[in-house]
Amino acid sequence: MKKIVDFSRYSSIKIGPKVEVEIIEEISKKNEEFFLIGGANNILVSPNPPKLAKLSKKFDYIKIKNGELIIGAATPTGKVVSFCKKYNIGGFEFLSKLPGTIGGAIKMNAGVKEYEIKDVLKWIRTFEGIIKREDIKMEYRKSDIQNIIYEAGFELKNGFDNTLLKKLLNLRTNQPKLPSAGSVFKNPKGDFAGRLIENVGLKGYRVGNMAFSDIHANFLVNLGDGSFKDAITLINLAKEKVFKKYKTILKEEIIIV
Ligand SMILES: Cc1cc2nc3c(=O)[nH]c(=O)nc-3n(C[C@H](O)[C@H](O)[C@H](O)COP(=O)(O)OP(=O)(O)OC[C@H]3O[C@@H](n4cnc5c(N)ncnc54)[C@H](O)[C@@H]3O)c2cc1C
């Protein structure tokens, strides 16, 4: 089945063309020809993207089986947090207000501070079957997973931590409300991308209708009808200026498709 997706509406940064997207209903090697999109909260879609696919609702489920939490890759992170709260399960508090799907969170090794999905993950299912966590390389905002994740198994730990949840939610108070894809660059070791962008004078800097937020410089925000071209101009400008001043190479966290 195919569906037309308008990325200027669907993606969190509200940029991108209206294109045909394959809706995946079954696990198959054939699906590997597509670039898989999850909730599109960490991607910037160009006017000419590769062939795209998205998992169908069939992959949106949460179950408890054999002492594990088994989650379909298309399940929204918010749903996982609600489930854990309801059944008093710990370890997933950091996914609160971290938008996306479980598949996207695993591929990106999403996290907040010292809490990352790699620490609760036990296995993933791809078209080749189950791959154990110890056979997957996962580090700060990246994994070496090359195939589509259909479902994943997680540790089932008792005790949803409301205090931790509040602490993590508090961290989001300085997060811009305008459309963005979260942090645009990864933090270089021992530093903050936001600090570097601010120190080269780009905090609040605008090109067309895109800007580095004046609240948090590492958020590239869409002020309304911002374009892909303007987003790329700003990304390149920040990389150039930061390299010139600090000899630090900023690496995109955002994935350009
Ligand atoms: C306001 C805001 C706040 C954010 N805060 C945080 C934060 O605190 N911490 C953080 O880590 N991130 C944060 N992000 C970024 C984003 O939420 C995460 O990267 C999230 O995990 C992306 O999930 P997604 O489903 O939207 O993935 P997408 O953006 O759709 O895709 C991201 C990548 O994952 C791949 N992918 C998606 N699904 C699958 C799958 N089933 N199998 C294989 N690959 C897949 C895609 O191919 C792509 O490479 C934030 C984003 C926004 C907009």
Image: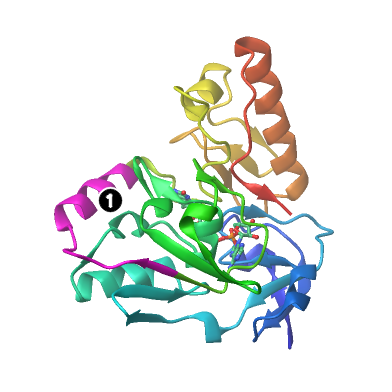
Pick the quarter of the image with the C terminus: bottom right
246 shown above or below 16: above
From the top left corner, tell me how far across and down residue 78 is, in percent: 37, 68
Name the spot of residue 195 as percent of width and height, x first. 47, 23
Disc 1, ligand 1: is the CB inside 8 Å? no
Q: Which residue is mark 1?
A: 169
Q: Is residue 173 above or below residue 251?
A: below
Instruction: Name which residue lies at 53% across and 81% down.
Output: 59
In the rendering, at what x and y percent does residue 82 appear? 29, 72
Disc 1 crowd, CA 10 A, few/some/many (<14, 14-19, 20+): some
Q: Indicate the amino acid at tag 1.
A: Leu
Total residue callouts: 1
Location of residue 111 with respect to 192 vertically, above or below: below
Q: Residue at x 80, y 60 (%)?
A: 49
Residue 179 is at least partly visible in this image: no
In the displayed structure image, the side of residue 209 where residue 137 appears, left or right? left
Q: Is residue 154 magenta?
A: yes
Residue situated furthest top in the rendering = 245
Residue 58 point in image, percent of width and height: 54, 86
Image quadrant occupied by the N terminus: bottom right
Of the pair 101 and 233, the residue shown nearer to us: 101
- Asked which quadrant contains residue 4, the reply is bottom right
- The image quadrant where one finds ligand 1 is bottom right
Magenta range is 153-172
Residue 52's quadrant in the figure? bottom right
Label 1: element kind: helix
Image quadrant in which you'd find residue 238: top right
Residue at (28%, 75%) from the top-left corner? Answer: 67
Its colouring scheme is rainbow
Can the viewer see residue 31 in this picture?
Answer: yes
Residue at the spot x=54%, y=36% of the render? 186
